[in-house]
């Protein structure tokens, strides 16, 4: 299976900060990468597919980039609703795998 | 708008089986391919398998081969995930999620159910 590694595992930030989360794949996955947001006790919410394409309704302060083995999720100006855990997920192979998550908490 | 409604929490003994359901409402259910994903306490999300929209083709990761069975009942607009040989490590929240392709396989998930807690304890 393709291993997905996220960093940092926890990130402390303030409202208005620019936040960047990194996701690395154990082998090249082209741009077959998705991002999800999860709040405590809730189901994940789909944000981005094919590394950089926002799902409809996702605020434009979210952006994704990368290809191959290294990817980033950026929140340009952190809002109160953005404090959550973020997961990357590869779909390059028929065995889908997720990163370990990055918790964005209030500084 | 489609919503995925999952069955309620389950408490099981080790060695038992559990069958969790996921009912789509608000649209033509037969058009949706479905995945199952679980999340153990404090752990990352883990993909358990997929069923396509029409001919019941399924895929499972090697870890769950032989232990997980995903089925659908189109007349009831419901997809089921059955996990057998339960052990304490299977204690988790189990989610159903639609494949964004709608019909077949894209490999990522655009709509999620609210989750079903399965607890395994003697």
Image (cartoon, rainbow, N blue to C red):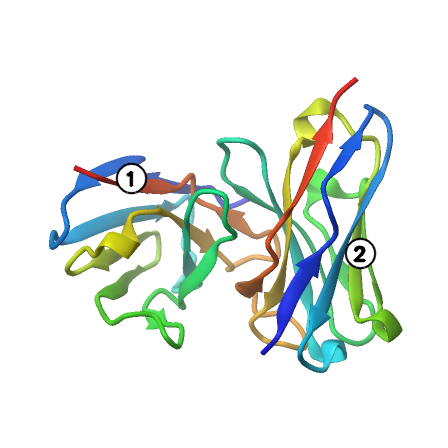
Q: Position of residue A105 (x, y in %)?
A: 26, 40
Q: Residue at x 73, y 41 (%)?
A: B64
Quadrant of res B3: bottom right
The reply to the same-chain question for discs 1 and 2 is: no
Which disc, if any, is residue B80?
Answer: 2
Mark-to-mark CA distance, 1 and 2: 35 Å
Residue B66 can be seen in this image: no
Which disc, if any, is residue B94?
Answer: none
Q: Position of residue B35 (x, y in %)?
A: 66, 59
Of residue A18 and residue A41, the one placed in the foreground of this image is A41
Q: Residues within 10 Å of mark 2 (few under 14, many from 20)?
A: many
Compared with B25, B34 (above or below) is: above
Q: In this rendering, which labeled residue sits more in front, label 1 or label 2?
A: 2
Q: Residue at x 72, y 51 (%)?
A: B60
Picture quarter with the C terminus of chain B? top right
Which disc, if any, is residue A7?
Answer: 1
Compared with B119, A79 (above or below) is: below
Left or right of B101 in this view: B89: right
Q: Residues within 10 Å of mark 1 (few under 14, many from 20)?
A: some
Of residue A96 and residue A18, the one placed in the foreground of this image is A18
Q: Position of residue A46 (x, y in %)?
A: 45, 63
């Amino acid at each position: 299976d393709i291993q997905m590694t996220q960093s940092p595992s926890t990130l402390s930030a303030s409202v208005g900060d620019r936040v960047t989360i990194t996701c690395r794949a154990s082998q090249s996955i082209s741009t077959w990468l998705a991002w999800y947001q999860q709040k405590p006790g809730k189901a994940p919410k789909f944000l981005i597919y094919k590394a950089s394409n926002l799902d409809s309704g996702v605020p434009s302060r979210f952006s994704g980039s990368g290809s191959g083995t290294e990817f980033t999720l950026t929140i340009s100006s952190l809002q109160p609703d953005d404090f959550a855990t973020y997961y990357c997920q590869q779909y390059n192979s028929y065995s889908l795998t997720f990163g370990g998550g990055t918790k964005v908490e209030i500084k | 708008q489609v919503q995925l409604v999952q069955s309620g929490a389950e408490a099981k003994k080790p060695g038992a089986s559990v069958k969790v359901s996921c009912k789509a409402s608000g649209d033509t259910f037969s058009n949706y391919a479905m995945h199952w994903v679980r999340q153990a306490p404090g752990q990352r999300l883990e993909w358990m398998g997929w069923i396509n929209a029409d001919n019941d083709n399924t895929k499972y990761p090697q870890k769950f081969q032989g232990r997980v069975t995903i089925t659908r009942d189109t007349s009831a607009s419901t997809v089921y995930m059955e996990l057998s040989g339960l052990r304490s490590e299977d204690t988790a929240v189990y989610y159903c999620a639609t494949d964004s392709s709608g019909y077949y396989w894209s490999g990522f998930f655009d709509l999620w159910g609210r989750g079903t807690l399965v607890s395994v304890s003697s």
